[in-house]
Image (cartoon, rainbow, N blue to C red):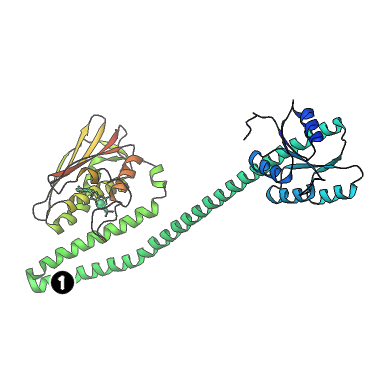
Amino acid sequence: MIAIADKRVVLVVDDERGPRESLRFLLKDEYAVICADNVDSGLDILKREHPDLVIMDIRMPGKTGIQGLRELRAIDALTSVVMLTGFGALETAQEALRLGANDYISKPFDTTEMLNMVSRFTLRSRMEHKRVRMLRELQDMNSKLTEDLATKDRLATLGQSSAEFVHDLRNPLMIVMGYINLLDQQLVKSQGMFGEQLGEAADYLEVIEKNMRRCHELIQMWQQADGAELSQLKPIAVAHIIDDLVMSVEPLVSAVDVEIEYQVDDGGAVVLGSRAQLVRAIHNIISNAIDAVDRGHGNIVLACHRRDAAIEFRVSDNGCGMPPDVLARIFEPYFTTKPKGKGTGLGTVIAKRIVEEHSGFIEVKSTIGQGTSVSILLPITTAPAAD
Ligand SMILES: Nc1ncnc2c1ncn2[C@@H]1O[C@H](COP(=O)(O)OP(=O)(O)OP(=O)(O)O)[C@@H](O)[C@H]1O
Ligand SMILES: [Mg+2]
């Protein structure tokens, strides 16, 4: 390609040397002029050089300018074309206009008229190409926007159906809770009649009841989770978070014969946030620890201490630990090493999101075969507790 910075390019296609050279001479100062002496080589140059204007003679041996124009328009609808006609060849000139030429000029041409035409039509080509380019960009933007909108629509539908699903889940849950109460009452009555024999059944029922209550709380939390809850952060006593955790974790550990020890020295610390959400975050970390330890030998410690201006909730376990490649991925959504149906790979993601929404952060240390320690650090506030 001829690399002539921003000079407009004119292609002259004429079999006669005279007009070709006089056009080259006339235009060479302002334009880059390329010449061809027949239609085929003219079209080759057109494909290569993308001129701003083609000046083509109508009468040429072999392929005529009219044939050349037809072929040119089939490959390029935008570039301006001016036909050179012989004196008195008005009909052919008009045919050329019908076939897509932009104008014609008769030989011998008037140089001023020619210069005006070249200036006008080279500019026109540039504008046309620019217009088409912008139109294409606009169409691209439009289709990207349509795609984005469709994705947003899909997400909105997903959000809506999840909301409906969670709403519907409440009903059977309430029924089960009702039956648990009935069963509890029956058990109390039967206990009087059968003595100790029903002791274990009562314990099982308690675990079921606590977990059903937790399901109920989770649903409530989900329904309120529209951000409204976090936009009104409240000062919460750390001690209350620990109380809630003990309540929700005890039934889990006792069900799988795992020891949990609480080492709490919160010094009356208060944090700003949502009590339910913070309990949810730490609960997820503890439930990972429960999954990681051996039944019967498992030991989990929930420690809570001040660390400078922060409060640290540290969950340590003597479980399986993690190799570095697992450790590197635990905050990835849907990453799980647990069997299908056991883990969704969202526990740590939820915990991290909640902690970060509370301006805190999570640290994880793990040694394979020895255990894991997960620390959640949250800033302490000086505001008095509101809960
Ligand atoms: N205390 C831990 N000890 C060993 N591995 C852990 C521990 N905590 C997390 N992991 C690893 O990180 C992975 C991701 O944990 P995450 O809580 O996000 O998902 P999950 O526990 O697999 O599923 P769920 O969504 O039910 O929580 C786990 O599958 C496990 O491999
Ligand atoms: Mg988990």
Residue 185 placement: quadrant: bottom left
Q: Quadrant of the C terminus?
A: top left
Observer-nearest residue: 96 or 159? 96
Q: Which residues are magenta?
A: 328-340
- Residue at 48%, 57% (x, y): give it: 154
* Mark 1 burial class by Cα count in 10 Å: few <14, some 14-19, many 20+: few
Observer-nearest residue: 194 or 227? 227
Please indicate whether residue 81 sits to the left or right of residue 304 in the image.
right
Task: Pinpoint residue 378: horizontal percent, then vertical percent.
Answer: 28, 37
At label 1, which amino acid type do we have?
Lys
Q: Provide the residue designation for mark 1.
A: 189
Residue 315 visible in rendering: no
Task: Pinpoint residue 259: horizontal percent, then vertical percent.
Answer: 11, 51
- Residue at 10%, 66% (x, y): give it: 199
Assign the magenta stretch its main secondary structure: loop
Is residue 334 a member of the stretch shown in magenta?
Answer: yes
